[in-house]
Image (spheres, rainbow, N blue to C red):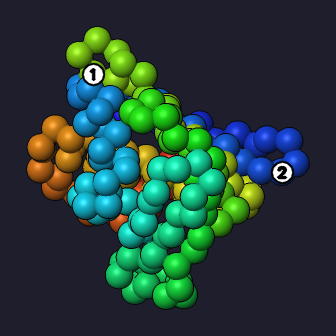
Amino acid sequence: MTAPGTVRRLAGGRVEIRFERRFAHRPAKVWRALTDPAELRGWRFPAVVELDLTPGATVWFHPTPDQLERFGVPPDPVAGRVVAADPPRLLEYTWGTETLRWELTPDGDGCLLVFRNTIDDAGAGPAVAGGWHAGLELLDAVLDDRAVHWDTWQRAADLQKQYEESS
């Protein structure tokens, strides 16, 4: 298992979920996986994204077929806004009321990713952390061209339990 993320309460009742992951790939390759719509789908990012990297631009998050089926989410896209973009080092955007911040730093032959997701619902912290944890494991496998022999949703549910127990 990769290192767990942290879930902590912020001022005002918001919650920050934070992960650090080292990838054996240069920042430019990881950046593409975080910003290219086809690559985002390759590691099952939890939305179909229309992303313009211009600060202030609108980002559209369309629900995936899995989200529609599993969670009954409305089929309408959710808007966000690009807060900051400095390719291939920094990307921050909002997704509805959430904020996602991706920071890439060169590290030897690879890079270090620090990812933060700030949410309003403190009770959702373990579920969100489990989902991102599983997603980042999948991202790592896709970047390394390794097969994954586990179900993403089941992995996220198992990890959610671990985050609930550690809260």
Residue 155 visible within the image: no
SS state under label 1: strand
Residue beneath label 1, please? 110
Rendered residue at 40%/86% (across/down): 69
Residue beneath label 2, please? 13
SS state under label 2: helix
Residues under labels 1 and 2: Cα distance? 35 Å
Q: In this rendered view, identify the residue nearer to me: 142 or 99.
A: 99
Query: Would residue 156 be found to the left or right of residue 128 on screen?
Result: left
**Residue type at numbered disc 2:** Gly
**Residue type at numbered disc 1:** Gly
Query: Would residue 13 be found to the left or right of residue 47 on screen?
Result: right
Q: Is residue 47 above or below residue 29?
A: below
Rendered residue at 35%/81% (across/down): 65
Tell us which disc is closer to us: 1 or 2.
Answer: 1
The percent coordinates of residue 27 (x first, y second) are: 32, 29
Rendered residue at 51%/69% (across/down): 60
The percent coordinates of residue 128 (x first, y second) are: 55, 56
Spot the residue most to the right.
12
Few, some or many residues within 10 Å of mark 2 (<14, 14–19, 20+):
few
Query: Would residue 129 be found to the left or right of residue 112 on screen?
Result: right
Residue 133 visible within the image: yes
Few, some or many residues within 10 Å of mark 1 (<14, 14–19, 20+):
some
Rendered residue at 76%/43% (across/down): 9
The percent coordinates of residue 124 (x first, y second) are: 65, 60
Image-quadrant location for residue 88: top left
On-image quarter of the C terminus: top right
